[in-house]
Amino acid sequence: MNLLAVFDNDGTICDTQEVEGPCYAKAIERVTGRSLATMDWTTYEEPTSSAIVRDLLAGDPAALVKEEAIEREFVRLLEQERPMFPGDFTPLSGAVQFITRLKEESICSVAIATGCFGSSARFKLLCCGITLDDFPHATSSDTPRRRDIIPLAASRAGFPVSSVVYFGDAPWDVRVSGILGVPMIGIGRRWERLRDLGIQHVFRDYSDADAIIRVLLDLKNQEPNQAHS
């Protein structure tokens, strides 16, 4: 079947809640001595791990070295905080089983496209029982813009963007799906917000897998403008 389900990670697979943002901000501060202006990711033009750092370090001749140091410190902090915030490192209900079912029943192919750094995505997914390298994937370590991350993941899976149905949880996922013209299924804690932003098909989690699969297959048979209505 010429269908590729592309999954975001944070909030879509991993039930990220409280600890992610503070760890990221703390890593930046420890490496650069500078604080983020805000942790409201909706205010950033490109709310990905690498894009925010690169914007902050623009013009710094040591930017690449500092970005790598921030990534290492970020993962170290996540590892440190995991025992105190176990819920932030667990999958949404039914997520792992859903992704496994898509593959095992040959419903569609699966790829992962995340705005995280590669190493932090790998760690968080492993906490959820998913090995990132088992899937075609792209992260913000590959390219900082989400509108490029999704096509790159699709390309690595051997699919054009026109074959993608995107699973996301955030306002910026709504924006990028619109930019790329791909249908989106909203998932996660912000499902009501996603519905308010115009995503017709939203789910709190993957508990009703049959319903999500029906939507997934129906969306792929629609024109992109219908899928966003």
Image: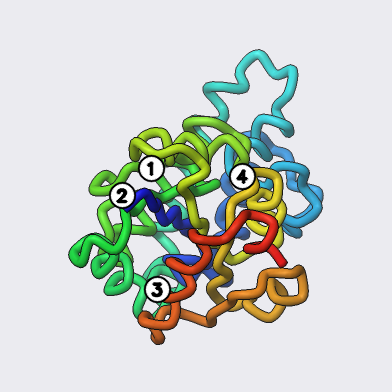
In the displayed orientation, state which residue is furthest to the left: 104
Q: Could you classify mark 3 by the number of other residues whose Cα lies within 10 Å: few (under 14), some (14-19), or many (20 or more)? A: some
Tell me the residue at 46%/47% (across/down).
163
Give the left or right position of residue 36, taking residue 76 as reference: right
Kindly identify which residue carries mark 1. Answer: 137
Left or right: residue 212 versus residue 66 is left
The residues tagged by marks 4 and 1 sit, at their Cα atoms, a distance apart of 15 Å
Disc 1 and disc 2 in contact, CB within 8 angstroms: yes
Q: Which mark is residue 48?
A: 4
Q: Using the image as rendered, state which of residue 76 and residue 160 is in the foreground.
A: 160
Residue type indicated by callout 4? Thr
Q: Amino acid at mark 2?
A: Leu
Indicate the amino acid at tag 1.
Answer: His
Sort mark 1 into few (<14), some (14-19) or many (20+) by Cα contacts within 10 Å. Answer: many
Of the residues under marks 3 and 2, which one precedes in the sequence? 2
Q: Mark 1 against mark 2, which lies toward the viewer? A: 1
Q: CA distance from mark 1 to mark 2?
A: 7 Å
Q: Nearer the viewer, mark 4 or mark 1?
A: 1
Query: Is 114 placed left or right of 192 in the picture?
Result: left
Label 4 element class: loop
Mark 3 vs mark 2, foreground winner is 3
The three-letter amino acid code for the residue at tag 3 is: Ile
Residue 182 placement (x, y as % from top left): 59, 51
Of the image marks 1 and 2, the number of the one nearer the N terminus: 2
User: Which residue occupies 57% across, 35% down?
Assistant: 148
Q: Which mark sits nearer the N-terminus, 3 or 1?
A: 1
- Residue beneath label 2, please? 132
Q: CA distance from mark 4 to mark 2?
A: 18 Å
**Residue 72 or residue 45, whichever sits in front:** 45
> Disc 3 and disc 1: Cα gap in Å?
21 Å
Between disc 4 and disc 3, the foreground one is 3
